[in-house]
Image (cartoon, coloured by chain):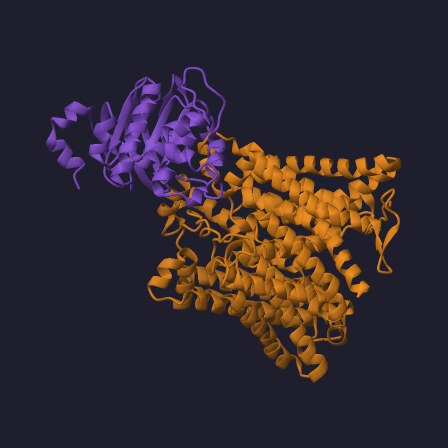
Chain colours: A orange, B purple
Amino acid sequence: MSFYVVQFLSGLASAASLFLVASGLSIIFGVTRIVNFAHGAFYMVGAYLAYTLTEQLAGTFGFWAGIVLAALAVAAIGVVVEMVLLRRIYRSPELFQLLATFGLTLMVEDLVVLIWGPDDLLGRRAPGMRGAIDIFGQNLPTYDVFLIVLGPLVLGLLWLLFRRTRWGILVRAATQDRDTVAALGVNQKWLFTSVFALGVFLAALGGALQIPRDAVNHTMDLRIIVDVFVVVVIGGLGSITGAFVAAVLVSELNAFGILVFPKISIVLIFLVMAVVLVVRPWGLFGKPEAPARQMPGLTVRPWRPLSVNERLAFLVLLIAAAALPLFAGNYVLTIGAEIAIFAIFAASLHFMMAVGGLASFGHAAYFGLGSYGVAMLAKFAGLPMVACLLLGPLMGLIGAVVFGWFCVRLSGVYFAMLTLAFAQIVWSIAFQWVEVTGGDNGMLGIWPDAWVATPATFYWLSLTVAALAVGGLRWLTFSPFGYALRAMRDSPLRSESVGIDGKRVQWAAFVVAGTVAALAGAMFVYLKGSVFPDNAGIALSVDALVMVLLGGVETVSGALVGAIVYKALAIWLVSYTELSKLVLGAIIVVMVVAFPKGLVGMWEVLQARYWPGATASGKARRAEVAE
Amino acid sequence: MKLSVNALNSFYGPAHILFDVELDVAEGEVVALLGRNGAGKSTTFRSIVGLVAQRSGRIVFEGRDVTREPTHAIVRAGLGYVPEDRRIFTDLTVEENLEVGRQPPRAGAPQWTRDKLFTLFPNLGEMRSRLGGRMSGGEQQMLTIARTLMGNPSLVLLDEPSEGLSPKIVEQMAHAILTMKKEGVSILVSEQNLHFARLISDRVSIIERGRICYRGTMEELEARPDIRDAHLAV
């Protein structure tokens, strides 16, 4: 019995930091409508800075001063980030904001390794709190008691701040209606900056307070951000009370889940989240969101199928690509195959995002399912390659059928977060179910059949599959199904009123995209000869998003260009610089701020400006550019 | 002139909404902007306070060109705006709603306090800690005006204050507007309800399809039933 009490209390202590970070994210989202992916990075920097400061400052006072100073310093960094970066993207679509702040996270990850090194750092224990107290014969660290008290204390302080101060009232008003607050003479800019500073302060404080409990390392940002997403989604974005309740819930699920279901403890939390989202899509304490902001002007240019000439041009390009083995070596051909596979993957996400308006943050789930599908068929059933390639993606299809059913019930940020959660479920199953998937060691030795065993033949196979997949998705885009999907994207209400079963259409699109992604995952296994949990990881999901954005969301097939450019760039960066994440993150940030229309979108704008007669709709385009 | 609007053109995306709108309001005056639904009244007001991004023209308030200034700066200069759809903060209490609107006192403009506003709108005084979302339409209309007055404006843009209100509340509203005028607030009010406009205004402009098509004093308009029927009658 006493063991369970202590387990419960220790869960409460873990909830404190989680609550601090989650409430910060929630406050920022409430006012700025930005889901700050970089929140985990601020948490991490808070921990690193606190580590350094508490090492430097002596004594009890020095320790606590170090913690607070670290949080304040990070808040100051947050102010700079808000003024330099976020102010430029407040009006951008949610996805761009998520990506820009993710880019920031990547940069920070490399920077902390540069400054503090790659090894775990063990921080000082809190002075005067090194002992433990006795609860029915079990030990509970004194520091945990402090954290248990701190959580509700911060909740109370925040409540006072938001109820009893003018600043708090303004923030609550802005959370509901920013324009009206401005129309009453309040300068939103500084309100946003101060809100962001507070949110970042809370995140950094959460990180700083972890140093007596946990080692500081450069992967703690992604670990916390996934937990925090889960907390704010369960609690309701924008609700501080919700963040508190959900932080306690998640921490207790962690504390007890590991006792009851040690194998699927991670899955348990995401299952709870999925259930909450289906029952209350806006979270336990959240409010239903107003319909998502329309983005007028983003997709003004009418889409059309390629003309005969353009089709011929593509054919020529394809033949040119197929001629690559005539003059390139094995290394280049392997890279070529990888790029072709990623073109399939990016095209599948692009179909869902651009045509369906469904921005998934967890598309790697289906890539990963396809990979493991193939690997299991090859390893356990011993099927030949062609059979594996045809049957393996079915696992992605099944996953997309199940997950998609839940996801299409939501939209906007919540859709993005739920897709991310499902992807994390897939990842954690792959990671934890060691008997079947090999866990972190992966499944090895899955090689293609003899007829495609050389780099050149495998390259041709990849190119063929990619051409078929991209062509097929294009064909779908201009089929009646594609029209219905676009109608749902542009105006759900009107589509429903002309008899389109919107959720069903979106579900179908989700399944199509998932299956094609699984096909890419299946090919990828034979390229690498192995499969690892990373095939379903966040990093891969984000790679796909970046490819789509780089190509341009509003284009029909921009993902193709995005995949080629991004993958080539990433491979080149990894081989030429140690700081690939820093460079990649910077590229993402610059791209979102400077080229929100992507490469193909930019090309179209330039084309319209300088060669207005080049295409039939040139005139209309020029008018749009001028406007 | 307290406020003068010259050659105002506004656009929503590719749609041209306002065409060379001219308006002015003298010190202490109540000017009514009349027009049917969709004529461009609200767009005119939103353009004046900078809530419509795409616009051209010149807006001069108290001798200062505010055309290029952000919304909050225009409002802080003393130009208050009461939106048509009220935009009450439903999660905030009456007193908190007023707090959002509060600005420091301004030279040359009447000063309003919470107590003074509760005298002007007695209903509000009885529900100080009620949530905005739990008020009737008429109460919300009073609150949105009171909230703007908390900024101590010298001129107020009132967008359709009588819309959707019961006759009794409309009467209270007219009384409140006349009190504001007496205190020295200049007012530009948009209306579809000619009867209501007659109670409160000195001068009239009529807008139709984004163009000003008539201007004159209230008496002049009374003498021209043809104009009234052509541009205002339903």
Q: Nearer the viewer, residue A34 or A130?
A: A130
> Which quarter of the rendering shows the N terminus of chain A?
bottom right
Give left or right: position of A18 versus B7: right
> Which quarter of the rendering shows the C terminus of chain A?
top left
Give left or right: position of A21 versus A506: right
Farthest residue, direction front: B126
x, y (%) of residue A590?
A: 60, 43
Q: How many marks?
A: 0
The answer to which quarter of the image holds residue B157 is top left
Give left or right: position of A184 versus A154: left
Q: Is residue A445 above or below residue A249?
A: below
Q: Is residue B79 visible?
A: yes
The answer to which quarter of the image holds residue A561 is bottom right
Give left or right: position of A410 versus A200: left
Identified at 34% across, 38% down, the residue is B84
x, y (%) of residue A175?
A: 52, 42
Q: Is residue A79 above or below residue A516?
A: above
Q: Is residue A342 visible?
A: no
The answer to which quarter of the image holds residue B214 is top left
x, y (%) of residue B6?
A: 31, 24
Q: Is residue A68 above or below residue A234?
A: above
Q: Is residue A159 above or below residue A329?
A: above
x, y (%) of residue A100?
A: 60, 46
